């Protein structure tokens, strides 16, 4: 999200004069302001302009501000965009319905622009902090995913190494015993493809990381980069070619 000085505000009101005042006042303190004069226009503007915060009049012709808020908050892409309702001082019902629809705050008409700017700044700051927390959680989840994936790779390579090493030591200890020599060859033929598969999976893993592909989903806690599937897939290809 943009910093406060360049944050984008969508103001929705059916009174052109009020929109002009809001636009002039907020742009004077470096906000970028988009306006709409109806609920339908407001919803279209949300999709088109992706505002950082919405200032929404309750009493709009046709679709009410509360309905606009409800539809906006039901959209996964916009559910965390703060909405400040503009309502009359005595309209308690509007405020209750607005909060039920997902609104984050309200200001009463006629409002002071200093108060409005303070509320905008507070909600934008809160949203920015929330996004930073989400980003931190994703970084932690990514590191955990990398760690788990590398552990699995190391496990595959270590197993292959121990298997070959064990039969090689027996073959060295009993050089005249052809059984151990044959077993060493057989073990190598079994384990080398596994190591090859791990190396190829590692190359794919590194490539995905370079494109910022997350190996772990912090929300579902399920692996979205399945190293074992990758390795088994390579092994299947090797077996077919063999």
Image (tube, rainbow, N blue to C red):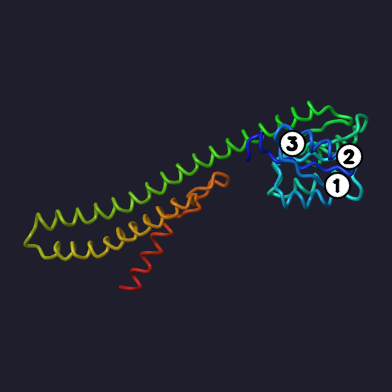
Check if mark 3's residue and mark 1's residue have beta carbons within 8 Å. Answer: no
Total number of numbered discs in the rendering: 3
Residue ID at (19%, 64%): 185
How far is disc 2 from disc 1 in space, using C-alphas? Answer: 11 Å
How far is disc 3 from disc 1 in space, using C-alphas? Answer: 18 Å
Quadrant of the rendered image containing residue 132: top right
How far is disc 3 from disc 2 in space, using C-alphas? Answer: 15 Å
Using residue 153 as the reference point, say whether residue 123 is left or right of it.
right
Check if mark 2's residue and mark 1's residue have beta carbons within 8 Å. Answer: no
Using residue 121 as the reference point, say whether residue 206 is left or right of it.
left
In this view, 211 is above or below 116: below
Using residue 215 as the reference point, say whether residue 89 is left or right of it.
right
First reached walking from the N terminus: tag 3 or tag 2: 2
In this view, 132 is above or below 183: above
Kindly report which numbered mark, 3 or 1, lies closer to the viewer in this rendering: 3
Q: Disc 2 marks which residue?
A: 17
Give the secondary structure at mark 3: helix
Residue ID at (58%, 45%): 219
Give the secondary structure at mark 2: helix
Q: Nearer the viewer, residue 145 or 66?
A: 66
Give the secondary structure at mark 1: loop
Q: Disc 1 marks which residue?
A: 37
Q: Disc 3 marks which residue?
A: 27
Q: Residue furthest bottom?
A: 241
């Amino acid at each position: 999200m943009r910093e406060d000085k360049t944050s984008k505000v969508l103001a929705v009101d059916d009174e052109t004069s009020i929109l002009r005042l809001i636009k002039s006042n907020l742009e004077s303190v470096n906000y970028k302001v988009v306006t709409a004069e109806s609920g339908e226009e407001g919803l279209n503007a949300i999709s088109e302009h992706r505002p950082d915060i919405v200032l929404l009049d309750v009493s709009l012709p046709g679709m009410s501000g509360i309905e606009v808020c409800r539809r906006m908050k039901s959209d996964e892409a916009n559910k965390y965009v703060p909405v400040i309702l503009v309502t009359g001082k005595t309209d308690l019902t509007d405020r209750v319905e607005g909060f039920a629809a997902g609104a984050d705050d309200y200001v009463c008409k006629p409002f002071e622009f200093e108060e409005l700017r303070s509320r905008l700044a507070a909600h934008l700051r809160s949203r920015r902090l929330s996004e930073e927390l989400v980003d931190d959680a994703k970084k932690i989840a990514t590191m955990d995913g990398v760690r788990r994936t590398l552990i699995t790779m190391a496990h595959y390579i270590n197993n292959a190494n121990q298997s070959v090493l064990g039969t090689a030591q027996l073959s060295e200890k009993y050089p005249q015993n052809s059984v151990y020599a044959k077993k060493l060859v057989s073990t190598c033929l079994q384990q080398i493809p596994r190591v090859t598969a791990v190396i190829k999976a590692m190359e794919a893993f590194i490539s995905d990381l370079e494109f910022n592909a997350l190996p772990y989903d912090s929300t579902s806690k399920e692996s979205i980069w399945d190293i074992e599937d990758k390795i088994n897939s390579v092994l299947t290809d090797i077996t077919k070619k063999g």
